Image: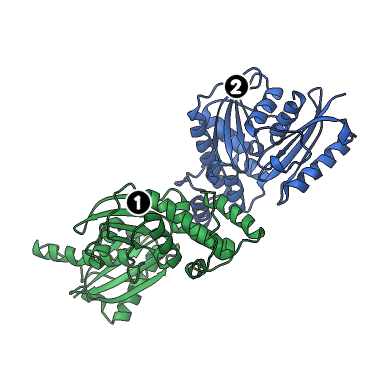
Chain colours: A blue, B green
């Protein structure tokens, strides 16, 4: 029997999966914390426990993400872009463009029928173009990250942000709060602002339908809707959008 | 007869009161709150009290800065770029380049014979403004005014790889936990900000004299970092915060003289410093 593990150590969360015959056998998500090495070890133990396996049962382990180098038990390393593409392709074989909104970056990746990357663009220098923007704003609005999407969807009059900077945006949001603007309108404005950045990123490489969205940002239903409106396209959302890259790493492990 | 310049910046509000010879009688600096109109009145009143000048003897008032439209008692609004250039030129007649790093933007002005001929500005990204220092100082738990002196103690500058203020904040927290010294991190942060401002300024040919103004110019570590990144000497006025308000006061005098010579009325008599509300005129 062939079992494969994929570990994705991100800047905020670390994700791990075990697959067998392309079926998900185990999956685990934890905060990355300061020590990636122990985080990777925690994930490994949990995954092996869930699948009732020992390390010797695993044929291959592929690590990816910011902290891939800290996964000492990995047999190979792979780039995040490649893993996100393969993970997306395994769930939606028809998808030609994958959008990933992560904690510290956003990516738009074009994928062929074999799940290979044909082109990509990435934004990783500016917090306002990543999931971090939502985190910062949720903090200003004192709302839980998981409530951000549903709250924003209640808005009838989203505010327009005059700035494209997360730090200036923070001040602007505070000003709007003191003016008595409802939180849902500010949250909706935040989602629109980020969607605008994603859209300009996507325009750098011609978007091809169908499209999928993944990464932690895809858990924000308001953001997904805002990106759909900006790009004027429907977005497919996998059931667990956070683990797509880890899943892709496991698939890469199965082909090594 | 007196003239005043009111500069409402994003972080600080400044007032300069001048007599007819251009001698500064009083300067007031206070934090800009959310209520610009209230504050403009308050700082103006303080400046008058300090100089013991009655309001009716103030002939002309120019408002500048991003809150310049919220100064109901001003005769005229003039952009901060023009006011800065005028203020810098009055202090340094050989100034060719003026760089102003404020709390919410950074500007580089090209000056020729005291006139503003061109400018570049960053107000889009906090990482190229004084805001960067504010955020990082808060992360380090250090007062803004202590950054300069602390950074001069640095022996081993920690380079900061992230541009974005928010990502840099995270990076700095990581460096601190690795045991890097605050002074080395601050020195790295000054270098990072200086290199971004200098990149902006290099759209012009850098010719001496180069003058640095704005709140950030009070930070000696930043002045050094700017010098190093520009590769030339930098002049800093004794009070770098008030050049905009000073320029506004100088322009107030020019405008008054022009109005009088053209026989236009100047509204000195009807000027009031009532407790204004946000909606009053």
**Does residue A130 show up?**
yes
User: Helix or strand or loop: what does disc 2 sit on?
Assistant: loop
Q: Quadrant of the C terminus of chain A?
A: top right
Whole-percent x, y for residue A123 in the image: 54, 38
Identify the subunit bearing mark 2.
Answer: A
Whole-percent x, y for residue B117 in the image: 23, 51
From this view, report whether residue A234 is shown above or below residue B7: above
Whole-percent x, y for residue A58 in the image: 84, 31
Same-chain status of marks 1 and 2: no
Q: Tell which tag, 1 or 2, sits nearer the viewer.
A: 1
Whole-percent x, y for residue A169 in the image: 50, 50
**Does residue B277 show up?**
no
Residue under pointer 2: A96
Q: In the figure, is residue B99 to the left or right of A195? A: left
Q: CA distance from mark 1 to mark 2?
A: 43 Å
Examine the image and state in which quarter residue A67 appears: top right
Residue under pointer 1: B201
The structure residue drawn at horizontal position 75% and vertical position 30%, both measured from the top left corner, is A250
User: Helix or strand or loop: what does disc 1 sit on?
Assistant: helix
From this view, report whether residue B72 is shown above or below residue A12: below
Quick one: label 2, few (<14), some, or many (20+) residues within 10 Å?
A: many
Q: In the figure, is residue B143 to the left or right of B71? A: right
From this view, report whether residue A225 is shown above or below residue B27: above
> Considering depth in this image, is A134 or B242 the residue closer to the camera?
B242
Q: Quadrant of the N terminus of chain A?
A: top right
């Amino acid at each position: 029997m062939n079992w494969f593990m994929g570990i994705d150590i991100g800047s905020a969360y670390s994700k791990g999966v075990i697959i067998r015959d392309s079926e998900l056998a185990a999956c685990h998500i934890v905060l990355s914390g300061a020590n990636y090495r122990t985080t990777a070890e925690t994930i490994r133990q949990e995954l092996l426990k869930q699948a009732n396996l020992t390390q010797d049962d695993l044929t291959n382990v592929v690590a990816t993400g910011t902290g891939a180098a800290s996964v000492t038990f990995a047999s190979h390393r792979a780039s995040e872009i490649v893993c996100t593409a393969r993970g997306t392709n395994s769930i939606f074989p028809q998808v030609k463009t994958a959008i990933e909104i992560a904690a510290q970056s956003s990516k738009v990746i074009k994928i062929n029928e074999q799940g290979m990357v044909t082109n990509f663009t990435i934004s990783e220098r500016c917090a306002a173009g990543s999931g971090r923007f939502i985190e910062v704003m949720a903090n200003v609005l004192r709302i839980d990250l998981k409530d951000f999407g549903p709250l924003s969807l209640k808005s009838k009059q989203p505010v327009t942000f005059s700035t494209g900077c997360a730090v200036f945006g923070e001040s602007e949001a505070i000003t709007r709060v003191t003016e008595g603007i409802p939180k849902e309108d500010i949250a909706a404005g935040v989602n629109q602002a980020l969607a605008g950045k994603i859209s300009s990123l996507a325009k750098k490489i011609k978007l091809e339908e169908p499209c999928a969205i993944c990464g932690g940002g895809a858990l924000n239903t308001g953001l997904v809707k805002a990106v759909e409106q900006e790009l004027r396209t429907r977005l497919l959302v996998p059931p667990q959008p956070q683990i797509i890259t880890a899943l892709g790493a496991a698939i890469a492990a199965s082909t090594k | 007869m007196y003239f005043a310049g009111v500069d409402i910046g994003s972080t600080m509000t400044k007032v300069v009161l001048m007599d007819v010879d251009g001698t500064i009688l009083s300067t007031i600096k206070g934090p800009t709150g959310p209520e610009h109109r209230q504050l403009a009145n308050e700082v103006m009143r303080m400046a008058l009290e300090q100089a013991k000048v009655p309001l009716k003897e103030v002939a002309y008032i120019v408002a500048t800065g991003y809150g310049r439209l919220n100064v109901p008692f001003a005769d005229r609004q003039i952009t901060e770029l023009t006011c800065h250039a005028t203020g810098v030129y009055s202090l340094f007649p050989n100034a060719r380049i003026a760089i102003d790093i404020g709390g919410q933007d950074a500007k580089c002005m090209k000056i020729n014979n005291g006139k503003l001929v061109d400018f570049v500005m960053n107000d889009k990204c906090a990482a190229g403004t004084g805001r960067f220092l504010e955020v990082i100082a808060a992360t380090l738990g250090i007062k803004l005014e202590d950054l300069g002196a602390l950074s001069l103690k640095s022996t081993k500058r920690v380079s900061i790889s992230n541009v974005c203020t928010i990502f840099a904040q995270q990076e700095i927290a990581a460096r601190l936990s690795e045991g890097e010294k605050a002074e080395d991190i601050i020195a790295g942060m000054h270098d990072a900000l200086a290199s971004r401002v200098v990149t902006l300024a290099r759209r012009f040919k850098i010719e001496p004299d180069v003058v640095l103004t704005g709140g950030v110019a009070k930070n000696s570590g930043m002045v050094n970092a700017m010098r190093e990144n520009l590769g030339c000497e930098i002049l800093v006025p004794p009070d770098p915060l008030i050049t905009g308000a000073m320029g506004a006061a100088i322009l107030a005098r020019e405008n008054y003289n022009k109005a009088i010579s053209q026989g236009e009325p100047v509204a000195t008599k009807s000027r009031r410093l009532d407790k204004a509300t946000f909606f009053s005129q």
